[in-house]
Image: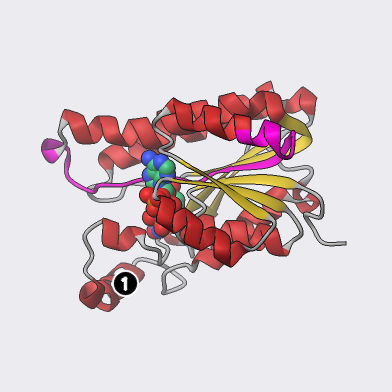
Amino acid sequence: MKKLEGKVAVVTGGNSGIGFATAQAFVDAGASVVIVGRRADAVDTALTRLGNRATGVVGDIADLATHDRLVAHIERTHGRIDIYVANAGMAQLEPSTAVTPETFDAHFATNTRGVFFGITKVMPLMARGGSIVLVSSIAGTKYMENHVVYAGSKAAIEAFARSWSIELKDRGIRVNVISPGPVDTPILEKLGVKPQDKPEFEKAVSAAIPLGRFGRPEELARAALFLASEDATFITGVNLLVDGGMSLL
Ligand SMILES: NC(=O)c1ccc[n+]([C@@H]2O[C@H](COP(=O)([O-])OP(=O)(O)OC[C@H]3O[C@@H](n4cnc5c(N)ncnc54)[C@H](OP(=O)(O)O)[C@@H]3O)[C@@H](O)[C@H]2O)c1
């Protein structure tokens, strides 16, 4: 039997990067997957690639109505959630003095408030023995230049996860965090790295990664699959660093 046979999983940001690779790994492991993403065309493309065990909800996770639509979709279709991966997130890297109230609020609206209410709204639908995985960043626990607001928005969800792992223990629901180091995804372009500058950028950053390279989305997906599956039934409240050792330096 496949690792997630018969399971129902939600992956936010499942149309791109780490989220798409996670949705793909879950489908390959036998799960039905619901992805949440902001761009309707990207959600459609992802669903075509994921096949007929995947469905989608289009919306901004900073808008709480998106989570209400997800809940309505689940109630109409599967009736429960076994695995919820809070992966959607954004970043704008700049020093503290450049941060405006607007960019500050954007980080916390998506990475923190959107994750908080995304999870609390699906809590009643989470099945006994379920698994919640939050995608943070090593910036949540380690200094990284110009990451100040992003780091704060991610550190907060690591604290949420610790509380939830205790709040949900009596329902057998495990709550864990994955903290990626640098991973080669479309987020790099969104951060302003031009395609032609990517090899040079990756080379420079890789000098600070003991394993000497960026992670691949599939490597993060395997960590999410591990935490979501029966392989991790005695693991709750951890923050799994998937960073090629970058946090050590
Ligand atoms: N790549 C890295 O180096 C790295 C390192 C540490 C942590 N992370 C974290 O890993 C997670 C996934 O990032 P990624 O690298 O895979 O980046 P990505 O390819 O840019 O994917 C981000 C995903 O989040 C979705 N998203 C962003 N803001 C959203 C919003 N307000 N509402 C709904 N969906 C939203 C995007 O949807 P649309 O495309 O439709 O906007 C996209 O599907 C993020 O939380 C990120 O902070 C990444």
Side of 189 where 128 appears, left or right: right
In the rendered view, tell whether residue 54 sits above or below residue 116: below
Judge the density around disc 1: few (<14), some (14-19), many (≥20) Cα neighbours within 10 Å: some
- Residue flagged by tag 1: what amino acid is it? Glu
Q: Is residue 81 above or below residue 1?
A: above
The image position of residue 207, as x and y in percent, is 33, 71
- Among the 4 quarters of the image, the one containing residue 218: bottom right
Residue 89 in sight in this render: no
Q: In the image as oriented, which residue stretches furthest toward the left?
A: 97
Instruction: Give the SS element for disc 1.
Output: helix
Residue 81 part of the magenta segment = yes
- Is any atom of residue 68 visible in this view? yes
User: Quadrant of the rendered structure where residue 201 is?
Assistant: bottom left
Q: Quadrant of the N terminus?
A: bottom right
Q: The magenta stretch spans which residues?
A: 73-98
Name the residue beneath numbered marker 1.
202
Q: Relative to 44, is 24 on the left or the right?
A: right
Residue 96 falls inside the magenta stretch: yes
Quarter of the rendering occupied by the C terminus: bottom left
Looking at the image, residue 13 sits to the left or right of residue 33; the answer is: left
Residue 150 locus on image (x, y percent): 32, 41
Q: Is residue 150 above or below residue 230?
A: above
The residue lying at 41 percent from left, 74 percent from top is 212
Q: Residue at x 27, y 73 (%)?
A: 198
Q: How many marks?
A: 1
Image location (x, y in percent) of residue 121? 58, 25
Residue in view at x 52 percent, y 54 percent: 19
- Colour convention of the picture: secondary structure
